[in-house]
């Protein structure tokens, strides 16, 4: 499963991810929906998820995503 596949699945199941104030942690809510399989997949893809969440946070503040960065993320995480 790619990171893009995982994010799509989480979205479909109503699970939202956010960055924790503690560096290197991801918050997944609602917790009661999380299965061991989903938790394991989040852990496996945690570095990529954190990178995407940080980029998303920067976009929300600035409204700007570097074109090269957007292409890199799209091709890396949502490629077939």
Image: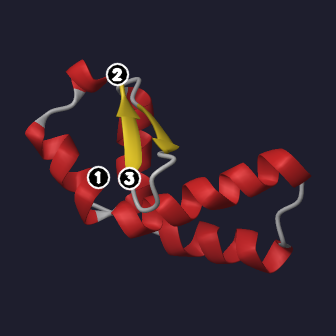
User: Disc count in the image?
Assistant: 3
Label 3 packing within 10 angstroms: few (<14), some (14-19), many (20+): some
Mark identifier at residue 30: 2
Percent position (x, y) of residue 78? 51, 63
Q: 78 or 26, which lies in front?
A: 26
Q: Is residue 78 visible?
A: no
Q: 36 or 74, which lies in front?
A: 36
Mark toward the viewer: 3 or 1 = 1
Above or below 45: residue 15? above
Mark 3–mark 1 distance (CA, rounded to whole Å): 11 Å
Q: 16 or 75, which lies in front?
A: 16
Task: Name the residue beneath numbered marker 1.
Answer: 42
Percent position (x, y) of residue 7? 43, 47
Percent position (x, y) of residue 13? 35, 26
Q: Specify which label sits upstream in the sequence, 2 or 1.
A: 2
Q: Where is the N terminus found, in terms of image quarters?
A: bottom left
Q: How is the rendered protein coloured?
A: secondary structure
Q: Dot 2: what SS?
A: loop
Task: Name the residue beneath numbered marker 3.
Answer: 5
Mark identifier at residue 26: none
- Relative to 59, is 50 on the left or the right? left
Q: Dot 3: what SS?
A: helix
């Amino acid at each position: 499963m790619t990171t893009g596949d995982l994010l799509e699945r989480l979205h479909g199941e109503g699970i939202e991810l956010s960055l924790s104030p503690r560096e290197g942690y991801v918050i997944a809510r609602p917790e009661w929906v999380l299965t061991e399989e989903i938790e394991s997949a989040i852990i496996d893809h945690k570095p990529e998820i954190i990178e995407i969440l940080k980029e998303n946070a920067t976009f929300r503040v600035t409204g700007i995503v570097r074109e090269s960065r957007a292409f890199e993320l799209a091709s890396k995480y949502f490629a077939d």
